[in-house]
Image (cartoon, rainbow, N blue to C red):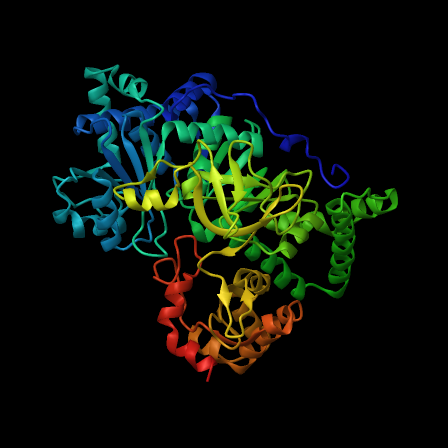
Amino acid sequence: MSQLWDTSGIAPQKNVVMAGETIPAIFWNAVAARGPNVWMRQKDFGIWRSWTWNQTAQAVREIGHGLMALGFEARHTASILSNTNIDWVLCDLAVLSAGGVSNGIYPTDAAEQVHYLCEDSGTRVLFVEDDEQLDKALAVRDTLPLLQKIVVFDMDGLRDFHDPQVISLKDLRALGREHAQQHPDMLAHRSAACKPEDLAILVYTSGTTGKPKGGMHSHHGLVYTVRGYNTLIARDERDECMCFLPLCHIAERMGGEYFSMYTGAKLNFVENPETVPENVREIAPTVFTAVPRVWEKFYSGVMIALKEAGGLQQAVYGWGIGVGQQVADLVLAQKPVPASIKLRFHVARLLALNNVRKMIGIHRARFLVTGAAPISPDLVRWYLALGLPMLEVWGMTETCGAASGVPADRIKPGSIGPAAEYNEMRLDPVTSEILVRGPNVFMGYLNLPEKTAETIDADGWLHTGDVGVVDEEGFFRITDRMKDIIITAGGKNITPSELENELKFSPYVTDAVVIGDKRPYLTVIVMIDQENVEKYAQDNDVPFSNYASLTHSAEVQSLIQAELDRVNKKFARVEQIKKFWLLDTQLSAEDEELTPTMKLKRKLVEKKYAPQIEAMYR
């Protein structure tokens, strides 16, 4: 594998990097060991500000003491309603250090959802990012009798606001400093009193099949899993990571905050979700974890830029990526790369491929990690052709994040790899459902013992709901969700995710939902990539006045039809998509059709757009 890239920095590490059997224990041990070193960075007013471990510890100590001054007891729950930022991490670690339970709420959630999550979790203190999030809390607080205090990170626009139940984070820290003078050892005692078996965090599922369920994770499960991550993909203090996915999601909480806390890798926070492309070029992370939608967006950006480039640049890129694909194909097949091709690849890197990597911001990356949703194998091969291993990991809230991962020295596009060595995986002999067992599996769903019993069987196997296959080398591949498999009227079993992933490889398609259960043929609902389709329309003089008119234009319809034709060529006739409909409403994370990780909710889309679906079958 070293013929294409250096895997020395990706080798699994089985040593214990930082001692501690609870999250607070690891954090405070890390502070003692790394005190003056930089741990986190965040851009404020155009300038990157660094936070050392000592500075982080001071803030966590003040917030923790402030919570105790408010009457926050061990095992009380605090929730955080905010975008991903350093304050989120500070408050999370303070809650855990005070012996409490930390819960995250998506900043895109409506007031009604905030009420449900606070009520279900028994939230005593609610941290909110700004006036927008505060409005949600104020709208529902009267029906939350356990809620004692609302803490606001950013008080801009609230200078003249006064409410006895609301306090700024700045004032909470000041309160904490006073409390610490009177009770200097109280936070340390609370942290030391935390037991590995204690409930540490709640991670609510996205609620695509009903109300969100609160996944419970103990300190032991979190510590066990975060140590296991280093046996899957290693990091150390030299690494630069980018933190931008929601911290209330298990992926960023574990793979970002806690894993970096354990290994000492630096965490760089983006300004906001819209500035990710700009920030990644500034940060140039050495390890980059993202969801497929981000990787698709980067690829689309390169393809669009290429169309605007001159003929010579297009030719050089075409030759360079062709050489890269040759090398990648040989390495994936575990075959030696001839010296002549190695030399050509070196030249291709110098002339074209390194520029593509710099354009994206991944020129310093040792490897890329993708997860949270299936990704097109062709996209994995494209990044490999640039000289970057893309490692797919798979897991869920209930497995505390990654439960399997593709090793750097044996990449198989389309596979989620073998089971991580810290858990077991197997297929149900009857249904082929993927089952997982290990100390990383969650404690169960809060307040839902029956749902927990349905999910974890008597032998400790977690039923994931994903259907898969496993090859002779132990590599798993997900074929679909159990509830999503389509059986056409002709009795043909169809895996919609394969078709959807092929469509999403197009720079003009953001997401797709294939329809066809008990139907005579397949159809698809498509969400276009607004930026790229708008650019196509402008470059080709296609008139449009708004998003809806853009999707209705004949030229855009033809553009998507061409992408559909490309995909259909890869499948048998019975598996081909006959008709499509473009979503003509511009969706954002606030819309009910999208999950917080920006995936279309299949069942809701099928229900909400039933008339449009029926029209495709008339």
When asked about the image quadrant of residue 583, the answer is bottom left
Lateral position of residue 341 relative to residue 430, left or right: right
Using the rendered image of the protein, determine whether residue 495 is visible from the camera's viewpoint: yes
Query: What is the total number of numbered labels drawn onto the structure image?
Result: 0
Image coordinates of residue 541 in percent, x first then y, are: 57, 79
Which residue: 78% across, 47% down? 330
* Foreground residue among 536 and 235: 235
| Rendering coords of residue 222 (x, y %) | 41, 31
Up the image or down, 227 lies above or below 164; here it is: above
Q: Relative to 163, is 398 on the left or the right?
A: right
Q: Residue at x 66, y 47 (%)?
A: 412
Viewer-closest of 448 and 233 = 448
Q: Residue at x 50, y 80 (%)?
A: 553
Above or below: residue 190 compared with residue 170: above
| Residue plotted at (27% across, 20% down) | 190
Tell me the quarter of the picture where residue 103 sits: top left
* Residue 458 place in picture, x, y as percent: 39, 38
Q: Name the residue furthest right.
A: 340
Quadrant showing the N terminus? top right
Position of 602 with respect to 360 (left or right) is: left
Q: Outermost residue, bottom direction?
A: 618
Residue 211, compared with residue 163, is above or below; it is: below
> Horizontal and vertical percent for residue 576?
59, 72
Q: Residue furthest front?
A: 430
Residue 82 in sight: no
Q: Is residue 327 left or right of residue 505?
A: right
